[in-house]
Amino acid sequence: MDPVLPAQRRPREKAAATTGAGRCLPSKMSSGRRPPPARVRVAVRLRPFVDRTEGARDTPCVRGLNSCSLEIANWRNQQETLKYQFDAFYGEGSSQQDIYGGSVQPILRHLLEGQNASVLAYGPTGAGKTHTMLGSPEQPGVIPRALMDLLQLTREEGAEGRPWALSVTMSYLEIYQEKVLDLLEPASGDLVIREDCRGNILIPGLTQKPITSFAEFERHFLPASRNRTVGATRLNQRSSRSHAVLLVKVDQRERFAPFRQREGKLYLIDLAGSEDNRRTGNKGLRLKESGAINTSLFVLGKVVDALNQGFPRVPYRDSKLTRLLQDSLGGSAHSILIANIAPERRFYLDTVTALNFAARSKEVINRPFTNESLQAPVLGPVKLSQKELLGPPEAKRAREPEEEEAETPDPPEAPASGSQSLSLLQKLSNMDPAVLERLVNLDRLLGSQGSKGASLLNTPKRERMVLMKTVEEKDLEIKRLKMKQKELETKVLAQEAVDPKDKENISPKMLRPLSCRTTTETEPLKKAVVIPLQLLQKQAASPHTEVHILKKRGRKRKLEHQDASKPEEKLEEVWEPEISPELLALGRQKILELLNKGSARDLRSLQRIGQKKAQLIVGWRELHGPFSQVEDLERVEGISGKQMESFLKANILSLAAGQRSCPS
Ligand code: ADP
Ligand code: MG
């Protein structure tokens, strides 16, 4: 071992120990430079198949790639593997010496420099933690090897004539359900963890045994381990549910002035199984144990992560385990985490969990692991999507339609898009124009608010233009229909104006559009008759039209005066129909024909002619021969001149227009 210079043998700085952020200088560095933040090195050890039962020795679910990386089948996709990168990877053929020599032995010398170190075996139960840490007489693990070497080192370094006198002590404790138990003195009960003024972590009352030889170590360690083994038998595999912590302290005292003192601590830890205890359906005590294990391992993961990522805060205090390791993880300490994994497929999920815990980096590799490596027993509880169940070609086929739909924007000229927009247009053109207009307005509004590509109708620009045109056309049609309605209303008014008293003769069909009107019978005649110009022109052009132009006329009328002896004549403004002479002549001729040739029944079809008047007309005709003119009707007994006038007014126009057909 390299001789250590006095200048480098400075006591550890408190700040570094308390924050664990790596502020102390490592022994090999000059005092003028800051050390890089200490990180936890991670090694993975894959144990060989140990299950001797038939069928268990089939394809492994994990395999090494080189001395630093491995790959494992990806349960999400059979065609992929997950590749993990570590500081070191030890395959199933690796020996105990490979692990010890490669990852543990190099850190031991730092203990003699007054620095701390820790070795932690992590992984699911049955993956080889105890084998790695303790091993067997035939294959001794990290603990016996480290103790042997350390004792050898201290003997050499502390030999007579050397500047430093060295002594080694050991403590052995167990953290079970967040209690610190002394395995060398089991009666001690739960011990407290404290921090001294220099930031060193200590456990007052914890047994420390001086050891000068490996035999002495074994003398203390083996019965304590049996304590744990006895406990495990009694408490149902308690050993896999507690953290076993062996603490080896190396004390150094300078033999000459200035008589400095140094202490280096080595933690060798066989952690509780990292398997997910929720999957085992634990209840009661087991569940409580699981909670404690999960908590401390979870916090350990966070601490390792914080140290390796260089986070300012490291959550040491969140569990007993990490609190105990506060001055031995991070800072100037040298730490190695050995993740133990098993090749059997029944370990698959726990292996993935352990690897994710330990991984510094991970990447997905596009290649199948082995066809047999992913089978139902492992994947049983996991719900796989259709994509995951299908291989890549099938999966691609399965997802192609939706992906293509999502990824390819619809070109407006594409046939599919074209037919879609056509059907959309057809649907829209059948819509109520008002609704359509609202939709388009809303769409326009959304577009103006910048919702790109998410317009209400989600139609391309070209399509929207067509829609706008449709709406405009509908608008024009509505206006045209409104005009026509007005014209019809005017026609009806004009019809009424011919004879207000004959209003009942207007067919209900004609009255309907005016039903909402509130005007009186006479007032509209004076005020509401506004005939459009084109209608006037039409009327002028066609003498056979049934609609008549009204003319304002002054007419003298006798008015009642207070003095009845002096009746007063006054000019009164009245509206009268002005009917074209041709139309009048036509109407008169038709009435005359009906009067001379029509039966009583035919005559009854005329306005103002009832059963009695019809019989009177027929009787008069039989006596006096045919009527020579329509005014002869006045000569019929029972029909006055006034009635004759009224009769003519009521019938002359309708007959002229052919609405009342003459009897054949
Ligand atoms: P853990 O402590 O993680 O629960 P163990 O160390 O008890 O697991 O190992 C489980 C079994 O596997 C033991 O029988 C052990 O001897 C065996 N084993 C573990 N690792 C190895 C290895 N590298 N080579 C051979 N056998 C191993
Ligand atoms: Mg074990």
Image (cartoon, rainbow, N blue to C red):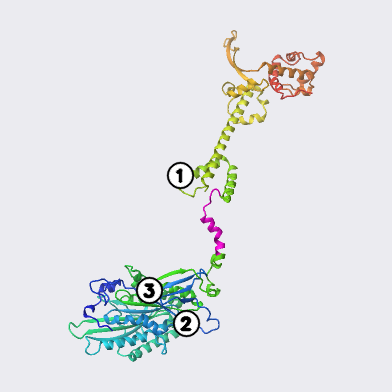
In primary-sequence order, the first of circles 2 and 3 is: 2
Identified at 67% across, 28% down, the residue is 507
Q: What is the secondary structure assignment of the residue under circle 1?
A: helix
Magenta-tinted stretch: 395-413
User: Which label was assigned to residue 48?
Assistant: 2
- Residue that sits furthest to the top in the current view: 565
Dot 1 crowding, Cα within 10 Å, few <14, some 14–19, many 20+ = few
Figure quadrant of the C terminus: top right
Say the numbered circle drawn on residue 534.
none
SS assignment at label 2 = loop
**Where is mark 1, residue-wise?**
448
- Observer able to see residue 276: no
Q: Position of residue 80 (x, y in %)?
A: 50, 69
Q: Which residue is mark 3?
A: 300
| SS majority, magenta | helix
In the image as oriented, which residue stretches furthest toward the left? 257
Q: Is mark 3 within 8 Å of ligand 1?
A: no
Asked whether the residues under the numbered discs 2 and 3 touch, taking CB atoms below 8 Å apart as contact, a structural biologist would say no
Confirm if mark 1 falls within 8 A of ligand 1: no
Horizontal placement of 497 versus 253: left or right? right
Tell me: 391 left or right of 596.
Answer: left
Q: Within 8 Å: ligand 1 and the Cβ of disc 2? A: yes
